[in-house]
Amino acid sequence: HTVQTSIPMDVKKMIYEQNVQSKPFSTPSNTLNFTVPSSTKAISVWVQSDDAGTNPLIPPSMFKCFANGGIDKPHLSLESIQLTFANTTKPSVRWSSAYTGDTNQLQQRYRDTYADAGMLSSSGGVERFEDYLTRGPVYHFDFSRTADDNSTELQVSAAFAGALGAGVSLYVCSWYT
């Protein structure tokens, strides 16, 4: 395969850097506090087994956790999530969510994630919903604000349908400049 293309002559500055933090999260409902960079523009959240990268069922690129010996998929059992940062709460209403055999309310979270990331209308498209579930859901929130806002405190409240099991952490990725 050969590709012919022109190489740009100017240097492009990286738009965002990432700061990733995690805290244990095993109970069905929890509120966690994080300190993030003051120039944070967006925040992504997911849960992942602490065995990621050492268990062949959970590579580091998959945001999953398993309960009961790998049978259940508690990472798909999100009931609600709400982030408070820079005097802003997202989503503004703590919506209910569920993903079971006959209920699919994660599709709206998938759509909101890609809308907030600005990828919903990109020419490259986004991953399919089925791939989003297979990889493990990531929830992304845009917190664009004025440069004079130096807030650093983030509070994440999340609830899952059941306990996530031992050895599970909630991760926060701060996208900052």
Image (spheres, rainbow, N blue to C red):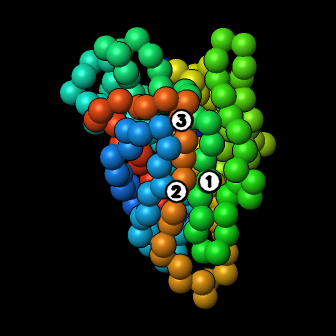
Q: Nearer the viewer, residue 165 or 145?
A: 165
Q: Secondary structure at mark 3?
A: strand
Marks 3/2 in contact by CB < 8 Å: the verdict is no
Q: Earlier in the sequence, mark 2 or mark 1?
A: 1
Q: CA distance from mark 3 to mark 2?
A: 13 Å
Marks 2/1 in contact by CB < 8 Å: the verdict is yes
- Residue matched to label 2: 156
- The disc placed on residue 98 is none
Q: CA distance from mark 2 to mark 1?
A: 6 Å
- Residue matched to label 3: 160
Q: Secondary structure at mark 1?
A: strand
Kind of residue at disc 2: Val
The residue located at (54%, 53%) in the rendering is 157
- Residue matched to label 1: 82
Q: CA distance from mark 1 to mark 3?
A: 12 Å
Can you tell which quarter of the image residue 123 is in?
A: top right
Q: Residues within 10 Å of mark 3 (few under 14, many from 20)?
A: many
Q: Position of residue 168 (x, y in %)?
A: 34, 37
The residue located at (47%, 49%) in the rendering is 30
